[in-house]
Amino acid sequence: MKKLGLHEVKKEFLDFFKEKDHLVEKSFSLVPKNDKSLLLINAGMAPLKPYFTGEVEPPRRRMATCQKCVRTGDIENVGKTDRHATFFEMLGNFSFGDYFKEEAIEFAWEFMTERLEVPKDKIWVTIFEDDDESFKIWNEKIGIEDKKIVRLGKEDNFWELEVGPCGPCSEIYIDRGEKHGCGKETCKPGCECDRYVEVWNLVFSQFDKDENGNYNNLTNKNIDTGMGLERMAAVLEGADNIFEVGEIKKVISEVERTTGISYGKDKKTDESIRVVTDHIRAMTFLISDGVLPSNEGRGYVLRRLIRRAARHGKLLGIEGAFLSELSSFIIKLWSEDYPELRENEVKIKKVIKVEEEKFQETIDQGINILDAYIKETKEKGEVVLSGDKAFKLYDTYGFPLDLTREILEEKNLKVDENEFNIEMEEQRNRARKAREGVGNGAWSKDDFSHRFKSFNTTFRGYEDIKLSSEVLGIFLEDEKVSKISEGEEGIILLNETPFYGEGGGQVGDTGTIKGDNFEALVLDTKKTKDNVIFHFVKVLSGEIEDGKEAVSQVDISRRNDIARNHSATHLLHKALKDVLGDHVNQAGSIVLPNRLRFDFTHFEGINENDLAKIEQIVNEKILEQLEVSTIETTLEEAKKMGATALFDEKYGGKVRVVKMDDYSMELCGGTHIDNTGKIGLFKILSESGIASGVRRIEAITGRAVYGYLLETEGQIDCVSKVLKTNRKDVVEKAKDLTEELKEKEKEIESYKGKMASSLADEIINEKRVINGINVVTYSVQNMDMNELRNLGDEVKNSLESGIIVLASVSDDKVSFVTMVTKDLVDSGYHAGKIIKEVSAVTGGKGGGRPDMAQAGGKDPKKVNEALELVDKLI
Ligand code: SER
């Protein structure tokens, strides 16, 4: 066997298949394109699906790749064993309707035995149980003896994803020798032990599985093979497992260096070191490919990886954030194969840092609470933590369920996941309701729009805003009718229309439709998924009849406002990328006549400077008067041109590219102004976070900025008038006034002090002697407890010995303070006891220390009665 490391196996494989006429392509992004069935690329074939199904013509019928892959189905086992990993690279050779079983097997054999020089006797294979054809090839052509060809069932030897290309497969195993085995008679590929390692999977991909689980025959018979790079390198290097492979070992060493803990010494710390070693690779590659942490989908996968790694870092004794530094090491080791890592280095480190720090903040808090829950659960003698507690941890402290689950497992406890899911669902419902309350203006009656399926309407609104066409259909309250009359509101379909139907975030047009004997207002325009455009109209006069001619006219000034906002949205998108980085991507957009709203991916709030810069760039691009043009082309062509493709556009078919000179280029079906100068001006009104990793900017253009300007000016004028100055001096004047106000407050404070001492003098004058004790009672108006206590202190200071009871009366309540000097406390007088009885007269309660006590009362009318009680008490 040749001794080859990761990079060398990769090179050997790709070179081999290049010689065999394969087109060698770079790894595709981990983020699937145009494939909603998959969260992350998890196999070499995944990004090539359209070539397998025949949907898209491949650049060549033979291809080979080394594909980055992430699989998180087994994430909980990563670390626990030395076999599981989330990130790996997969080598693969593919045939799209070109060669099939025979050549695929021959190529594999040649590569294994001649290139990698794996001894022939060490190779075993498995085949799908009734695949006699494969048996024959392995047995007769290649010469593998019968007993080394193991037939296995669908579970092992039929390869498929949820949906998509799939088929029976044949797997190649390497026998690592008896010393790795279980020693059983029956031991062979498929056995649980470590003797036979599966290194290569050859899939005879001839079906296309649909959503209903049907296996439809593919026109082409294809080959999809997958070789786990790390595993193959482990075998060739003679390493025990993937964590012992040279390159991965380097990462382990780096983790050892960072934590000061050696690998291979302790089961628990080994587990944590493996978690960090695996996850750091996965997160670095994911962020490099544009994934940002969030609470959903692939963003959540990433968040989970970062948090899990951070937590195991903590278990290894690391204080604070360390993953961001560690990612540099990954970038260093892998950037030769994946130059994008270097390009995205700043972003990768920043995203990890922000997320890790955010997590550090919550984790300490969350762990304390979880510890308390664990204690409580154990004390009750239970083994299951209730779902609502786990939900509370999640909801309030951002503590993911899986983390709770893992920590609980370490303490032999479980969590009630059912209950957790119910809580989660309820929260979703609440959120949904809240959203519905606001209304999103989207056309939601899907079944209704299905009725329009048979209609064919053409949108002419890019060129014309007024045109004559034929009424194709009329609907009144869901019913198809032949006419609608004055006063009625309904839906009209035309064979051609200048009205833009709401879509791509842009609202629908409004305007008028007129005919020989009718006139109607178009209140809104929408379109169905199949691009049938329908108009909500109100008939102002006459009758609209099916089949009649109608002249449609779009409200041009409103359309222009919308176009200004739409074009500004494109400039904003690009400016955001310029200032914040290429990870910024559209996450949602609303284009209205009076404003625009743009949601995008970014991991933290935008500071004032950057926001100002973004606004400035957009305005510069407006002033540069860039020409706006549109090009119709294919998606592939558009991507080649460098257009930003926002959503999962379908392969094939025509797409529309909106280009603003050399500055911005996006796929877009919306209506735009023809020169950025026509936007007028652009003003950002707000920037905020709407979900983890998603920010929102609201902004205005054109006449709305003018309106904003007038309003702001009006406010400044108004302020100037109130401050009795001119606009020029308004800021100075406001500053002066604030200063003056502060001075005055100080003065007032000092007067209050003076007044309090003269009031104290007045109170002392009320002093009387009862039983040889100085007694002072007094009632003031509208003092708060603080002021009342200060007053009491003043009186007490001037009175060497005595008992003071003060009351303050406001509209509906009374406050009391009682003070007793030290000598009298010593002889048994107690402020708390006195006040208790005194305040009770006014319906209040209170008490306190022997020398000072305070209380509240309810009935102001009884204050005098209450104070009179003091003398009697003493
Ligand atoms: N799709 C198969 C796998 O992932 C072969 O590439 O194993």
Image (spheres, rainbow, N blue to C red):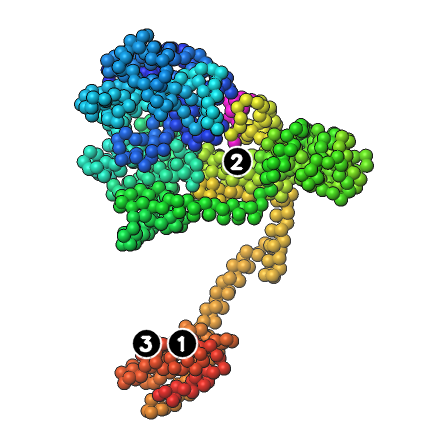
Q: Which residue is mark 2?
A: 573
Q: Marks 2 and 1, how far apart in space?
A: 64 Å
Camera-side residue: 382 or 866?
382
Q: Position of residue 136 (x, y in %)?
A: 34, 10
Q: Position of residue 800 (x, y in %)?
A: 32, 84
Report helix, strand or loop for mark 2: helix
Q: Marks 3 and 1, how far apart in space?
A: 14 Å
Q: Which residue is mark 1?
A: 845
Q: Amino acid at mark 1?
A: Lys
Does 802 appear above or below 722? below
Q: Is residue 542 left or right of residue 854?
A: right
Q: Marks 2 and 3, how far apart in space?
A: 67 Å
Q: Which residue is mark 3?
A: 849
Q: Residues within 10 Å of mark 2 (few under 14, many from 20)?
A: many
Q: Amino acid at mark 3?
A: Arg
Which residues fall within the magenta stretch?
634-647
Q: Quadrant of the N terminus?
A: top left
Q: Which mark is residue 157?
A: none
Task: Tell how many labels.
Answer: 3
